[in-house]
Image (tube, coloured by chain):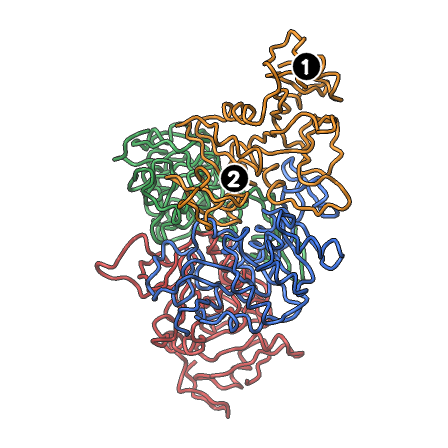
Chain colours: A green, B blue, C red, D orange
Amino acid sequence: MSAASILASYADAVADVEDGATVLVGGFGMAGMPVELIDALIEQGAKDLVIVSNNAGNGDTGLAALLAAKRVRKVVCSFPRQSDSWVFDGLYRAGQIELEVVPQGNLAERMRAAGAGIGAFFCPTGVGTPLTEGKETRVIDGRTYALEYPIKGDVALIKAHRADTMGNLVYRKTARNFGPVMATAARTVIAQVSEVVPLGGLDPEVVVTPSIYVDRVVCPTAQES
Amino acid sequence: MSAASILASYADAVADVEDGATVLVGGFGMAGMPVELIDALIEQGAKDLVIVSNNAGNGDTGLAALLAAKRVRKVVCSFPRQSDSWVFDGLYRAGQIELEVVPQGNLAERMRAAGAGIGAFFCPTGVGTPLTEGKETRVIDGRTYALEYPIKGDVALIKAHRADTMGNLVYRKTARNFGPVMATAARTVIAQVSEVVPLGGLDPEVVVTPSIYVDRVVCPTAQES
Amino acid sequence: MSTPSTSSAPAEAGPRDKHALAAAIARDVPDGAYVNLGIGQPTLVAEHLREGSGVVLHTENGMLNFGPVATGDDVDLDLTNAGKIPVTELPGAAYFHHADSFAMMRGGHLDVCVLGAFQVSANGDLANWHTGAPDAIPAVGGAMDLAIGAEQVWVMMTLFAKDGTAKIVPTCTYPLTGLACVDRVYTDLGTFELAASRGRADGAVVVRDLSGISLEELGGRLDVPVVLG
Amino acid sequence: MSTPSTSSAPAEAGPRDKHALAAAIARDVPDGAYVNLGIGQPTLVAEHLREGSGVVLHTENGMLNFGPVATGDDVDLDLTNAGKIPVTELPGAAYFHHADSFAMMRGGHLDVCVLGAFQVSANGDLANWHTGAPDAIPAVGGAMDLAIGAEQVWVMMTLFAKDGTAKIVPTCTYPLTGLACVDRVYTDLGTFELAASRGRADGAVVVRDLSGISLEELGGRLDVPVVLG
C-alpha cells in the first residue's frame, strides 16, 4: 500500500465496503468509537456484515443503529450485554443475529496475531470454561493453554485523534483502546480523526499507528489528497 | 512489584544477579546497548550466564568484554558474526561457548510471548530452514508454521532515554529496539537512563515502557529513592 | 446473618457492609502494588486506599495510574475506566492499547486484582460471568483474562446469595470464569484464604476476620470444611 | 560475461554494474511503496528512487521513513539502519520496538523487500544466510523474517558466482532462508520473474532485460529452463 488517502467525506471512505465483509470496529463504549464512519456505513447499505468490536452497540446510535438496520449477520465481541444494549438483545433473543463471545484479551490478541503473521497461539485465558470448549488444549510447563486463531478483518473502522498527511496516527487517552490493534489486522484500514496535521507535525517518537497500516484518513475539515 | 527504585550506582543495580542467570541485554549494535550495566556486571562477577541479545558483542567492550571474562555459558542471538565480533568468534571456535541462533523477529516475538503470558505460537519464519529443524510444524490455512516457545529472562539490562521517578520509560530513536520487549520478559528489569525526570515529567501518551515493568532505574546523577 | 457471635473465635459486631469490606481489602493491598479493580463493588476499594500508599490502578481499557472518578469539568469521555465511567489521570500515568493492556494482565505483571463473583469453589475456581440461565445473553468482558492473569486474585462478595445459598461451594455450578485462580475471598462474614487451603489435605478453607457469625454457624451453612486461620 | 549479444532478444550493451542494477530495481518500486532494503548492495536502491516517489523505507531495528546516510553533524548513534550505519529521519517517520517492527514484516505489511542471495531456486527458495561451510559461524539476523514477510521479495545479486557457478539453481545446495518466497531476481545479466514461473508447468523462469548475454548462452549456463518474458 502507499501512504494513506486523506478524505473529507465519510461516505467516500466506506463506499467500497462489500456485503459479507468482516468489519473491525474500534472503541470501548463510546471512547474511540468511530460513530461517523458507522453512520456512513449504514447509509452505504452493505449487509450480511460480521462485526468485530468489544461491545454490540449502545443505545440507538452507532453500532446499535447498524444492527437495527439489519445489516449485521454476526457479532464477535467480549461484552454484548449492557444496560443500554436493547437493540442487540432484541435481535439475539429473536434469533436474528449470531453471537461469538470472546474474552476481551483474546479478542485483542487474536487481532494482533492476524496483524503480526502468527498462525495461532496457545493462550491460558478461559481454559476450563465454556468459552474454550472444543478448542485444542496443551499443557506447557505445567500450565494448560487453549489454541486460539487470528481474527482478520476485511475492513477496520477506527477513530484516532490526529493524523499527519501520510496517515501516521496518534490517539487520545483511553480512546486508544482497540484502534492500534485493529489497524494491523484488516486489509483496508479507515481512520476518522479530529485533525490532520502537515507532514512533520507528529513527533516520530510518539506515533502510535505508523502510516503503513492506514489506508484512508477521514476528517471533514481536511484537504483531500 | 512496586514502583521502580531509582539508583545512582550501576554496581548496586546488578548486585544480586546470580550465577547461571538468563540475562536479556538490550541494544542493536551500540544503539540501546546498556554498556555501563554490562561493565558493572563484569565487575560483579556472576558467571555461567545465558545472554539473550541481538548480537554477541562488538570490539572489546560491553558484551564482548563480558564474554572475554569467561562469564557466559551460552549466547542466544540472531547475529553473532560481525566484522568486530572477534571475542565471540574465538570462544566459539574454541568450543568455549554455546550458541543458539534465532531469527531476529523470533527473538523479539518469543520474548514478547514470555511477557504476554502466551504459552507458544505458530510462526512462519524459518520454516523449511535449518533453524526450525526438529520443531513441531503445522499447516494452518494452507501455510506452514513452526511452533516457537517463549524466552524468559531472570534479569533484563536495558538502556532507555528518560525515566520518571516511578520508572516509566521513553527511548530515543532506533535505540528503542529490544528494550520495551525485554522489559516485559524478565523477572527483574534494570534500565539505565540518561535522565530521571520528576513525576509528571513524562506525557502519559508517550510512555513506551510503563512503570509496572521496571524494577530499577539507574542514573548516576539521580537522587536515589 | 446478624446473629450475635456465640463462638470463641474473634468476631466483629456484625456483618461488614460493602464499605467496611472495601476498607478491609484496601488495608491488605501492599504499598506500591499494581492493582486492577473489577467493575462494580471492587471499585470501592480505591476510596479506601491509604493516602501515599503508592498503589497504582490499572484499567484494562489501556491505562495505568488513573485517579478518582471525574466530576464536572474534569469529565472527559476519552478517559474512562473499564466500567466506562469517566476517571482522572494521576502523575506517572501511562496509556497503551488493548493488546498491550491484556498482555500486561495475562503475563502476570499485576500484583492483585479484585473481582466480584457468583460462586467460588474451595479450590479457587471462579464463576463470575454467567448465571447459566438459558435465556441470559453471555458477556464476559475481561473477567477471564483477569482471573488467570494477576499474581493474586481476590474476590469481593457476600458469602450467601439472597436466597441464602452459600457462594463458597465444593464445586461451582455456574459456568466457570477460571480454574483454581482465586487466592482469597473477602465476604461480609469473613475473609477466606484459598491459596493456603489448596495445600491442605482436608480441602478446608481457612477463615479469618469473622464478622457477625460464629465459626460453628459458618461451618453449618457451608458445604466445605472451614478452619480458623 | 561481456560477450556481445548474439540473440534476437533485446539486450543492453553489457552486464549491469551494481549501480545500474540498483537503478533498475528502483524503477520497478511502485510509488508510495513501503520497502525494506537488505544490508549490503540492496541499500544502493535508495539512491536511485525517484524524487517524490513517496517510497517509504523500513528498517527492521524499528523505524519507518528514514532518509540518506547521515554525515558530519547529522550522525546520531541512536539513529541507525539495520546495517548499523547512521541514517537520517524524514518528516512522517515513526519509531517502534523490535516486536512491533517484526510483526509489521511477518504480517505482510511491507510491499517490497530487496535482499542479497547466495542462491535462489527456480521455485523461489532463497539461500542467503549461510554458506554451509562447516567452520562458518551461523548468523541470520532478520533475513528469514524478511524472506517470508514482504508482499514481494526481490533478490539483487550477480547471476554467477566468482567461480562461474550459477546462482539461480534447480535446488539450493546452501542452507535455506525461506521456502518459495522469492518473486523476482535482479541480476547483472537479466531480471528473472519467479512468481510467474511458479505457475508454469515446465518449471521455467522468465527472463527480461537481458544485459550482455544472449538467451542462448544464458540457457546453456543455467540448469533451469529459461524463457523470454
Nearer to me, B216 or A149: B216
Residue identifier under label 2 = A152
Residue identifier under label 1 = D3
Q: Is residue C138 visible?
A: no
The image shows residue D170, relative to residue A161, as above or below, that is above
Q: Are marks 1 and 2 on the same chain?
A: no
When asked about the image quadrant of residue B157, the answer is: bottom right
Q: Residue at x 33, y 38 (%)?
A: A199
Q: CA distance from mark 1 to mark 2?
A: 52 Å
Residue type at tag 1? Thr
Q: Nearer the viewer, mark 1 or mark 2?
A: 1
Identify the subunit bearing mark 1.
D
The image shows residue D19, relative to residue A180, as above or below, that is above
In the rendered structure, the answer to whether residue D138 lies left or right of residue C43 reads right
Q: Residue furthest right?
A: D134
In the rendered structure, the answer to whether residue A66 lies left or right of residue C152 reads left
Q: Is residue A152 visible?
A: yes
Residue type at tag 2? Lys
Identify the subunit bearing mark 2.
A
